[in-house]
Amino acid sequence: KMVTVWCYIASISNTSSSNAFDIGGLPFTAIGTGTLDSTVGPVMIRYVDDNTTEPLTISSYISGGGTTLLHYISRGNNDSYGRVLHSHFNSGNIGYRTQLSYEVS
């Protein structure tokens, strides 16, 4: 079975914490047991600044066995990626949108 998560968040209040920007409590658990069973989806978002001059791509991600939507920044020039943190936002009006389909048991 497949489920689709669609999400819109107009604004957030926390733009200073070093905690990861995650969306937890999804009602269905992704099948599998880890990163090899993961699914990635596109993100539309604004006001993200991780203090690099490289182009950024942000993706939503759910790992096998997970019920939390994680967010990763991919940096174009040095082939690295890392978690999106609340402190990466320079404004709370993020206009976040994502859609992701994943397999459940």
Image (cartoon, rainbow, N blue to C red):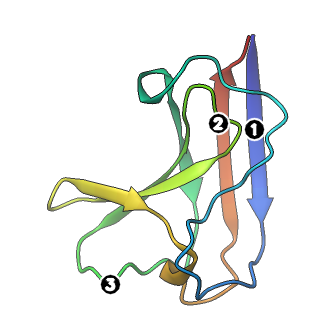
Instruction: Write the residue at 44% across / 30% down.
Output: 35
Question: Where's residue 93, x and y in %?
Answer: 70, 83
Pointer 2 local density, CA inside 10 Å: few below 14, some 14–19, many at least 20: some
Above or below, 79 against 39 in this view is below
CA separation, marks 2 and 1?
5 Å
Q: Secondary structure at mark 2?
A: strand
Q: Quadrant of residue 105?
A: top right
Pointer 1 local density, CA inside 10 Å: few below 14, some 14–19, many at least 20: some
Where does label 2 land, which residue?
100
Kind of residue at disc 1:
Val
Instruction: Write the residue at 18% across / 53% down.
Output: 79
**Furthest residue to the left?**
78
For the N terminus, the image quarter is top right
Kind of residue at disc 3:
Asn
Of mark 1 and mark 3, the one earlier in the sequence is: 1
Where does label 3 land, which residue?
51
| 58 left or right, relative to 54 | right
**Furthest residue to the right?**
27
Image disc number at residue 5: 1
Above or below, 42 against 88 in this view is above
Asked whether disc 2 touches disc 1, contact meaning CB atoms under 8 Å apart, the reply is yes
Pointer 3 local density, CA inside 10 Å: few below 14, some 14–19, many at least 20: few
Query: Which mark is nearer the camera, 3 or 2?
Result: 3
Asked whether disc 3 touches disc 2, contact meaning CB atoms under 8 Å apart, the reply is no
| 20 left or right, relative to 102 | left
What count of labels does the image hold?
A: 3
Of mark 2 and mark 1, the one earlier in the sequence is: 1
Question: Where's residue 52, x and y in %?
Answer: 27, 79
| 93 left or right, relative to 47 | right
Instruction: Write the residue at 85% across / 34% down.
Output: 27
CA separation, marks 3 and 2?
27 Å
